[in-house]
Image (cartoon, rainbow, N blue to C red):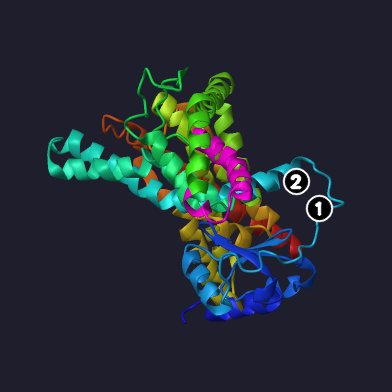
Amino acid sequence: MGKFEETSRYILEHVGGAGNITNVTHCATRLRIEVAKKSVLDMEALKTIPEAAGIVDKGRQIQVIIGPKVNDAYNEFLAVSGWKPGMNADAEVEDLTANQPHNAKWVMDKVAGFMAPVFMPIVPAMIVGGMILAIARVGINYFGLDTSTGTVNICMALFQAGFTYFPIYVGYTMSKQLKLPEIYGAFLGAVLVCDRINGVEGLSFLGIPIPQVSYGSTVFPVMLGVFFMYFVYKFVKKIMPEVITYFATPLVTMMIVVPVELIALGPLGTYLSDSIAGFFMWLESTLGFITQPILAAVYPYMVMFGIDKGISPISIAMIAEQGYEVIFANMGFISNIAVGATTLAVATTLKGEQNKAMKGLYSSFGVTALCGVTEPAFYGALISRPKALMGTACGAMAGGLVAGIFGLRKFVQMGCPGLMTFIMYIDEKGSMHYVTIAAAVAVITIAAAFLSTRIFLTREGRKAN
């Protein structure tokens, strides 16, 4: 066992043991544990989990803030607990929603809880593909890299694998989230990007014309298809004789789902994607640079409620539609940097030998946030300090204002935007124009967040004395 053995045993003890766990997943920073009965959880003990920055209570799901090493914690928790997928699937589950109003917060929690496990596992592929594309653009435009060489072909293959085949990844993770056989969703995504269908005109099925649609890098078409597949699969599996279900259920399911997907759901998803992208382009052109500081300031709270997970498909759709994106990447980039600078400012205010360990911990949280992963900093250092959060807002709004005025654009989709993802601002010609703007935005954001946080906390300390 490793670093998270004690953490895993502690969590297991206070969630009621493996018999109370119905699902275990993780995102970029959080270990997500769903339980059958929340009433047996020791919530006070769970607030002091070793090696964790805190917890987020989402009803029957407890989210443990671990940080970038969450995958290690996830694997160690599975080893310690002995929990396996499907375990306790028939356990009696407490109904926590009986008296809960189905208001906007309820809807947001449901959407966020569904979106996070769908998109977070794909982030590494997005990061690799995006960075490789940006590096290749620089090599081609500034260093004379020959586009016909094997080196460039390999680089572009990495980019293509990361984005062109996005429907396959989304199909897989969404099927897993819906508790379908994962290969079904991946298979549907592969059908969409198959060169016999993707962007091909003049197709028909049993005489019914199929609209010409390019599905590479799309999200909504395969999501609609997998959602439809969920109901088809349940029905087919229910009526299929057990003796032939192994080969007949996938065959019948796909023969129903694929034509409906190509004739109706795929084009509908593409229209939906284009409409959403068009709306946000209209919003940006109507409100202008004002949108950037406002969105950057509220982004930490979007992360807090999980709303940020639903942004990825919109951002991808906007880049596919116009080649760049000006709203969502900037607010994540600016906000994450502001959170990091604020956390470092908090660390510098901690005095005395008793705060030495906490100062080092907060400093590591701050550096991690500057690189794009903010949950440890937000939950571990800032959420209990309203004055520090005011500093975060000041920094985010200052950086957002500059980004809005100078029209900062992102050209490549990447997860966890921060100081490590500057290259997402390299345009298709390899120009560094927007990288320079992003660097200026980062400097202003860091300076404004750090200094304003120091001022707020210093004044608070003086009043307390």
Magenta span: predominant SS is helix
Please say if 360 is above or below 268: below
Work out how far the residue at label 1 is from the one at label 2, CA to CA, in angstroms. Answer: 9 Å
Answer with mark 1 or mark 2, whichever residue precedes in sequence: 1
Q: Nearer the viewer, residue 314 or 195?
A: 195
Observer able to see residue 197: yes
Question: In the image, which disc is placed on residue 225?
Answer: none
| Residue lying at 61% horizontally and 35% vertically, measured from the top left | 294
Residue 62 at x, y = what percent?
Answer: 67, 63
The residue positioned 40% from the left and 37% from the top of the image is 191
Coordinates of residue 310 in the picture (x, y in percent): 57, 41
**Left or right: 195 in relation to 121:** left
Which quadrant of the structure image shows residue 215?
Answer: top left
Measured as percent of width and height from the top left, residue 404 is found at 50, 29
The reply to whether residue 119 is visible in this rendering is: no
Q: Residues within 10 Å of mark 1 (few under 14, many from 20)?
A: few
Query: Percent x, y for residue 29?
Result: 53, 60
Q: Residues within 10 Å of mark 2 (few under 14, many from 20)?
A: few
Q: Is residue 441 above or below residue 457?
A: above
Q: Quadrant of the C terminus?
A: bottom right
Pointer 1 residue:
97
Residue type pointed to by label 2: Trp
The residue wearing badge 2 is: 106
User: Residue at coordinates 72% horizontally, 67% vertically from top-left?
Assistant: 91
Q: Which amino acid type corresponds to the residue marked 1 in the rendered image? A: Thr
| Callout 1 touching callout 2 (CB < 8 Å) | yes
Read off the magenta span: 220-247
